[in-house]
Amino acid sequence: GAVVSQHPSWVICKSGTSVKIECRSLDFQATTMFWYRQFPKQSLMLMATSNEGSKATYEQGVEKDKFLINHASLTLSTLTVTSAHPEDSSFYICSARLGSVYEQYFGPGTRLTVT
Amino acid sequence: QKEVEQNSGPLSVPEGAIASLNCTYSDRGSQSFFWYRQYSGKSPELIMSIYSNGDKEDGRFTAQLNKASQYVSLLIRDSQPSDSATYLCAVNIRKGGFKTIFGAGTRLFVKA
């Protein structure tokens, strides 16, 4: 299967600071990347869809000015959580998809804790 | 009606038994269907993809698709304690391009 990496795997930051999470597809070029958030014992929540070279499409209720997404190339997407607050503490997972009808491959996730 | 529905469980089966996980979806035009496994604290891992009606087998896993009934299932034969996880059903729907909708997942416990 395809390999997707995420960095960092965990991060602790202070309230008010910004955190950047990187997502890379290592062995394929991803036309689309996705960002999810998952709180403990809850299901995946799609935050945004990112296509290379165009603006991300955010899901309803997700603040685009708070969660900045940059899809710089076919193998790299970044999510920046700006002015993080404790309620932003969560498990952030990216995924990459080769084509429109194909499966998504998930990165290992980034656990963010805001103190 | 939710776009993708799964029984949240938990589903408990003894070791060696067959675990049967079910999923229904609402978009009749859906063409791609996936099963993911998610261990606690980890990200989802793709187990199976299925695109045509019928059965698709991969080792101990069999995915079954019935587009007329809008139903997809996953059978796990000879269940092992290591199969204990949450299983997510995912369906690609045509919604502003192709979007993958995930079910809430079914928790499976395999008792040794």
Image (cartoon, coloured by chain):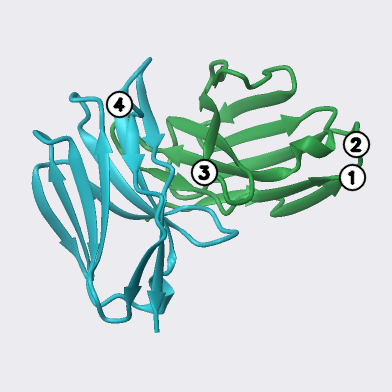
Q: Percent position (x, y) of residue B80?
A: 35, 78
Q: Work out how far the residue at label 4 is from the one at label 3, CA to CA, in angstroms.
A: 19 Å
Q: Percent position (x, y) of residue A38?
A: 60, 43
Q: Which chain is green?
A: A
Q: Percent position (x, y) of residue A84?
A: 83, 33
Write down the residue under mark 2: A15
Q: Do discs 2 and 1 share a chain?
A: yes
**Disc 3 residue type (three-letter):** Ser
Q: Quadrant of residue A19?
A: top right
Task: Return the chain for callout 4.
Answer: B
**Circle 2/circle 1 CB separation < 8 Å:** yes
Left/right placement of residue A66 relative to residue B29 reads right
Q: Work out how far the residue at label 2 is from the one at label 4, CA to CA, in angstroms.
A: 38 Å
Q: Work out how far the residue at label 1 is from the one at label 4, CA to CA, in angstroms.
A: 38 Å
Q: Do discs 1 and 4 share a chain?
A: no
Secondary element under disc 1, as helix, strand or loop, is loop
> Residue at horizontal 70%, vertical 50%?
A111
Q: Percent position (x, y) of residue B75?
A: 22, 62
Q: Do discs 3 and 2 share a chain?
A: yes
> Residue at horizontal 61%, vertical 50%?
A109
Write down the residue under mark 3: A43
Label at residue B93: 4
